[in-house]
């Protein structure tokens, strides 16, 4: 493929993406969102006076929350290295009279604070890690500030409720699996429901987040002079190329929602040396936990065939990062969140309005199969600005993100308070969770799914 070049000074540019599809998708999504009925809840939630007090608390906290969002945005940190963000959150919570545990659950950049006592207990989850090179292009600064604001606001009325509210600061969502490590340490054992949100280009109550697992593949061959004695070598680069090609061909024969993708990380040293080592890294995603297992088995067959065909030795490392499971959305909780954002002027649409292929993965899935959970999308940018793009990082510090931070804090705080105040809501939340399979034995699933 050729590249477009405007001048020698500008240098080569990659071909433009498929613009017609993007324009059509955005137009269709905007039309469908406008036509969709907003998600509503059959439950009464918290008494009006408590809801008013929570909303007023968030509004009063707004300057501090926006300062936190912008400060975290200006200091992007990679997963498990979010020391600045954790210190910044802890300082704000301490100033508001809360005890904060940093390094919680044996994870150095995890954080915990609690208000109230006993059960039921609802957790509000914060994220604050950034992406390499492009900072907060996933808007985790907004997630962070909205969660902190929701906790502080809910804490102000906890004396009028039974139970407690907890803030859990979760590091390394971007490829580190912080929530799974917290879960393994018992961080969600005493939690009855978990709520968080994610910035996006639309307001959606429930979205089909995929599960994902990773595998790193290395082929070991024999080096030789590529011109004088190639027959004495065994080409590891050929093996990884064959593996990549087979993996790419797998895309035609998987379920529409599934995704597989990878990169070659090592292809040798010089063209005149038969590469004795080559490596790649691959992701497998599915909307079903069993789908991840099936994709793993099919990928294994491809990798082994590449080794046999080239006479090389295969080395595989599965799950350097913990497996991310598909998110199990809890509809009654999501409906309360959507209802709580109506007074903020937001129309939160149900699942299916946003194209299902516009999705990714999150370690919130690992929480959602242990505890009833929600992970709604919050509009802070235009719908054609994709996450994990430098442009989205700019939007994460603009006025739309600021409005989203405050609206999101209100939505999460009210949903948490609704859960604590409304026994009928709690019963339906639990009933739906049990109907979806109840608490999943994550260790058994992952052990079964590893080839």
Image (cartoon, rainbow, N blue to C red):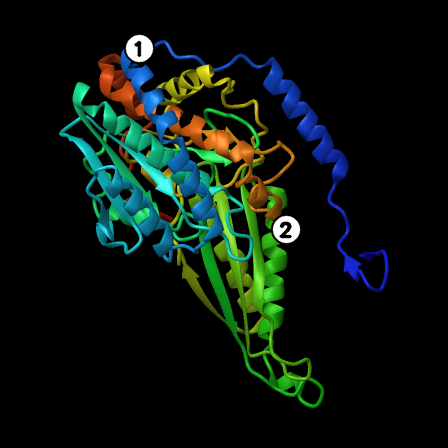
Q: Is residue 6 left or right of residue 272?
A: right
Q: Tell me the residue that label 2 is attached to.
A: 249
Sooner in the amino-acid sequence: mark 1 or mark 2: 1
Query: Residue 260 versus residue 167: which sits nearer the camera?
Result: 167
Give above or below for 207 relative to 221.
above
Q: CA distance from mark 1 to mark 2?
A: 56 Å
Asked if residue 220 can be seen in this view, the reply is yes
Identify which residue is drawn at 20% across, 32% down.
Answer: 115
Give above or below for 277 relative to 25.
below
Mark drawn on residue 48: 1
Identify which residue is drawn at 79% across, 60% down.
Answer: 12
Q: Is residue 155 left or right of residue 339?
A: left
Identify which residue is drawn at 67% across, 89% down.
Answer: 229
Which quadrant holds residue 1? bottom right
**Residue that sits furthest to the bottom in the current view:** 228
- Residue 372 is situated, as x and y percent measured from the top left of the image, at 31, 29
- Residue 164 is situated, as x and y percent measured from the top left of the image, at 19, 29
């Amino acid at each position: 493929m050729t590249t477009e070049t405007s001048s020698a000074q500008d240098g080569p540019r990659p071909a433009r993406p498929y613009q017609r599809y993007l324009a059509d998708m955005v137009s269709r999504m905007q039309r469908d969102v406008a036509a969709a009925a907003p998600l509503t809840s059959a439950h009464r939630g918290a008494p009006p006076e408590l809801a008013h007090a929570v909303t007023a608390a968030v509004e009063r906290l707004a300057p501090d929350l926006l300062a936190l969002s912008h400060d975290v945005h200006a200091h992007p940190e990679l997963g498990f290295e979010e020391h600045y963000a954790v210190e910044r959150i802890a300082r704000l919570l301490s100033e508001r009279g809360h005890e904060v545990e940093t390094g919680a659950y044996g994870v150095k950049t995890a954080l915990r604070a609690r208000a109230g006592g006993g059960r039921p207990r609802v957790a509000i989850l914060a994220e604050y890690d950034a992406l390499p090179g492009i900072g907060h292009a996933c808007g985790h600064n907004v997630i962070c500030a909205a969660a902190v604001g929701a906790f502080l606001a809910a804490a102000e009325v906890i004396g009028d409720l039974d139970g407690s509210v907890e803030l859990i600061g979760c590091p390394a969502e971007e490829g580190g699996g912080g929530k799974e490590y917290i879960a393994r340490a018992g961080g969600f054992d005493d939690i009855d429901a978990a709520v968080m949100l994610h910035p996006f280009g639309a307001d959606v109550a429930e979205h089909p987040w995929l599960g994902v697992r990773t595998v790193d593949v290395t082929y070991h061959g024999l080096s030789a002079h590529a011109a004088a004695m190639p027959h004495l070598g065994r080409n590891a680069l050929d093996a990884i190329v064959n593996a990549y090609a087979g993996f790419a061909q797998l895309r035609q024969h998987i379920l529409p929602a599934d995704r597989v993708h990878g990169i070659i990380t090592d292809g040798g040293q010089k063209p005149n040396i038969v590469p004795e080592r080559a490596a790649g890294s691959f992701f497998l995603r599915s909307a079903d936990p069993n789908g991840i297992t099936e994709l793993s088995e099919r990928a294994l067959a491809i990798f082994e065939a590449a080794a046999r065909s080239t006479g090389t030795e295969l080395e595989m490392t599965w799950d350097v990062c913990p497996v991310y499971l598909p998110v199990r959305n809890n509809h009654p909780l999501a409906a309360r969140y959507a209802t709580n954002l109506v007074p903020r002027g937001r129309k939160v649409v149900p699942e299916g309005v946003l194209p299902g292929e516009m999705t990714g993965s999150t370690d919130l899935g690992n929480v959602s199969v242990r505890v009833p959970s929600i992970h709604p999308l919050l509009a802070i940018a235009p719908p054609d600005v994709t996450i994990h793009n430098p442009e989205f990082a700019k939007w994460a510090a603009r006025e739309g993100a600021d409005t989203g931070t405050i609206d999101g804090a209100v939505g999460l705080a009210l949903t948490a308070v609704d859960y604590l105040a409304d026994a009928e809501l709690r019963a339906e939340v639990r009933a739906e969770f049990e109907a979806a399979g109840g608490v999943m034995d994550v260790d058994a699933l992952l052990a079964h799914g590893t080839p």
